[in-house]
Every structure is written in structure tokens, then in C-alpha cells.
Image (cartoon, rainbow, N blue to C red):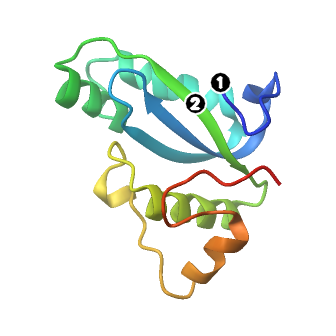
Amino acid sequence: MISPCGREGDCRVSGTVYLITCSQCNEEYIGETGTHLCVRVKEHVDGLDKCNVSTPLREHRLRSHSGAVVGIAVTILAREFDIAPRKILEALWIAFKNPAINRREERVDVTQELAPFADHCGLDPGGRQPEDR
């Protein structure tokens, strides 16, 4: 697992916005969780492996890789314990990175009122990662 500072033990942090990258094609998924990140990632991995589960990662595996096993990499994009700001951060990251694996209904539209705050969150409309602060 990759984190902004590369610290060990980041899988046990709670309150994160995270990026999952497909190791085979580099397509991305962005999500958020209030639970331990390792718990949420395990749910994603379980969804990848179960044939009867319809999850964004499972759909990606079937659509892009004909059902072949795929690896994933997880990166912490932001840490925020409060749910409302975390949801806003997730929406901003989705708007700026436009991840291919996220479902259309998951791609929250960011209103003009929220867009000016992107700079305060360290987001760059060009899709670059924020600098360590």
C-alpha cells in the first residue's frame, strides 16, 4: 500500500479517500471509507474474486481483462475523519481524476460552489497528485 508519506501501517488508518489502481492497465477507482482502510480494501478484493458480486472492480475485471485475475495498488489520497468533508474530498478527486472504474452514478458532480475549494485541498485540475504538505 502506498501512502503520501510512505509510512508503514497505513492500512489501519480510518477516515481516508483512497485510489485503487489496476496493476494490469492502470485504470483507477476512487473511494472513501470511515473504517480501517484494510477492511474496505478487503471488501473490494472479495468483490473482485466473487463471481456473483456486481462491484465496480469486478465489472472492470470482466470488461477490461476478460475475467482474468488482476492485481491492485492502493494509495491514500487524503485523510479526513469527518464524513461530510471526506465525501467532498472524494467528489473533488473523482471530478479531477475522472477514474474509469468508478460507475457513472458514483461520479458526483462538483458544483461551481465547491470547485474553488479544490486548490485548498491540494488538488490540481491537471490531474497531478497534490504535493506533501
Q: Mark 2 points at which residue?
A: 74
Q: Is 41 or 4 nearer to us in this picture?
A: 4
Would residue 72 appear left or right of 41 to someone viewing this image?
Answer: left
Q: Looking at the picture, how far across and down is residue 45, in whole percent?
A: 47, 21
Would residue 97 appear left or right of 124 to someone viewing this image?
Answer: left
Would residue 37 appear left or right of 102 to someone viewing this image?
Answer: right
Q: Is there CB contact under 8 Å for labels 1 and 2?
A: yes
Residue at the (34%, 42%) spot, across then down: 101
Q: Is 64 or 5 nearer to us in this picture?
A: 5
Q: Looking at the picture, how far across and down is residue 40, in whole percent?
A: 59, 32
Identify the image quadrant of residue 36.
top right
Residue at the (64%, 27%) spot, across then down: 39
- Compared to residue 101, the image places residue 108 above or below, namely below
Q: What element carries label 2?
A: strand
- Compared to residue 98, the image places residue 100 above or below, namely above
Q: Mark 1 points at which residue?
A: 1
User: Mark 2 is on which residue type?
Assistant: Val
User: Mark 1 is on which residue type?
Assistant: Met
* First of labels 1, 2 by sequence position: 1
Q: Label 1: how many residues lie within 10 Å, few (<14), some (14-19) or many (20+)?
A: some
Q: Is mark 1 on a helix, strand or loop?
A: loop
Q: In which quarter of the image is the C terminus?
A: bottom right
Q: Looking at the picture, how far across and down is residue 6, in whole percent?
A: 77, 29
Q: Quadrant of the N terminus?
A: top right
